[in-house]
Image (cartoon, grey):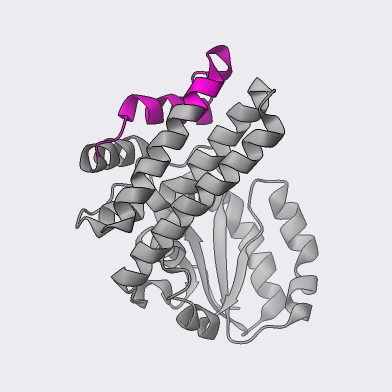
Amino acid sequence: MRELINLEKLPPAVAAKVEPYLKELLSLYEDEIMSVVIYGSAAGNDFSVKSSDVNLLVIFRKMDFSFFKKALKVINKGIRRKISAPLFLTDEYILASLDVFPAEFLEIKENHITVFGEDIMGSIDINESNLRLECEQQLKGKLIRIRQAYLEVGFKAKGMEALLKESFKSLLPVFRNLLRLKGIKPPVAKEEIIVELCEEFSLNSDLFFTILKDVRNDERIAGRDVEDVLKDYLNQIEKLANIVDKI
């Protein structure tokens, strides 16, 4: 079996967790795997042993349903250790989908560590016009989903709090890509992303930091008027979507 690489570049807790997991996964597929990538917080300085999951991308030469079934036992054990179910893709699928998922693939490209095989993600090329379109779609789609979800949980402070946290976490990659569209190399740290985003687009940084603190369980929104926070958040996201529409 070919060797794992670059484990020393990972946070020590991540390396210790993924090494036996990956060896077991690789043993299942022999030479069918072209590359294994760790991306997201586990590949950088923003990893939290307490709250962060490990995200992986496994790139195959070819793939069918049997590939998923074969890995169920290994992946289920990994989930219990906060290793998320990996993305199983082929290199052909990635190259054919760069125009559809430019933000997602760019996030992986700019914040990943290849731990096995070829550095396929380091060589992909993203078209900026596709990136702008997806950012707009993500923002406007999130507005629709938040409003709809509010109709379901609007009587429950904890439900609105959970809605805010989930929405904010899912939009952080979009915020990073909006900075790219402005010609700014986005930082990795969430605090720095918020500062740059709010300065560039004239947004309310205090509001975004309030939500970030709750995401990290430093300060609970539910102790305040969470509905007011949600209303202000919706207004800010709508403002941002209108700006992106005109970029």
Query: Residue 200: horizontal and vertical position, in percent?
Result: 22, 43
Instruction: Between residue 147 and residue 11, name the one nearer to us.
Output: 147
**In this rendering, position of residue 130 left or right of residue 221:** left
Q: The N terminus lies in which quarter of the figure?
A: bottom right
Q: The C terminus lies in which quarter of the figure?
A: bottom left
Total number of numbered labels? 0
Instruction: Between residue 211 and residue 242, name the one nearer to us.
Output: 242
What residue range appears in magenta?
A: 202-230
Query: Residue 207: horizontal and vertical position, in percent?
Result: 39, 26
Query: Residue 101: horizontal and vertical position, in percent?
Result: 47, 69
**In this rendering, position of residue 99 left or right of residue 87:** left
Query: Residue 32: horizontal and vertical position, in percent?
Result: 62, 84
Q: Quadrant of residue 63?
A: bottom right
Residue 214 vs 178, above or below: the answer is above
The residue drawn where x is 70% and y is 51% is 79
Return the residue found at the far left: 183
Is residue 98 something one can see in this rendering? yes
**In this rendering, position of residue 96 left or right of residue 50:** left
The residue drawn where x is 39% and y is 31% is 208
Question: Magenta span has 188?
Answer: no
Residue 143 vs 68, above or below: the answer is above
Is residue 11 something one can see in this rendering? no
Question: Magenta span has 211?
Answer: yes
Look at the magenta stretch and give its main secondary structure: helix
Q: Quadrant of residue 8?
A: bottom left
The residue drawn where x is 35% and y is 45% is 240
The residue drawn where x is 47% and y is 52% is 140
Return the residue found at the far top: 223
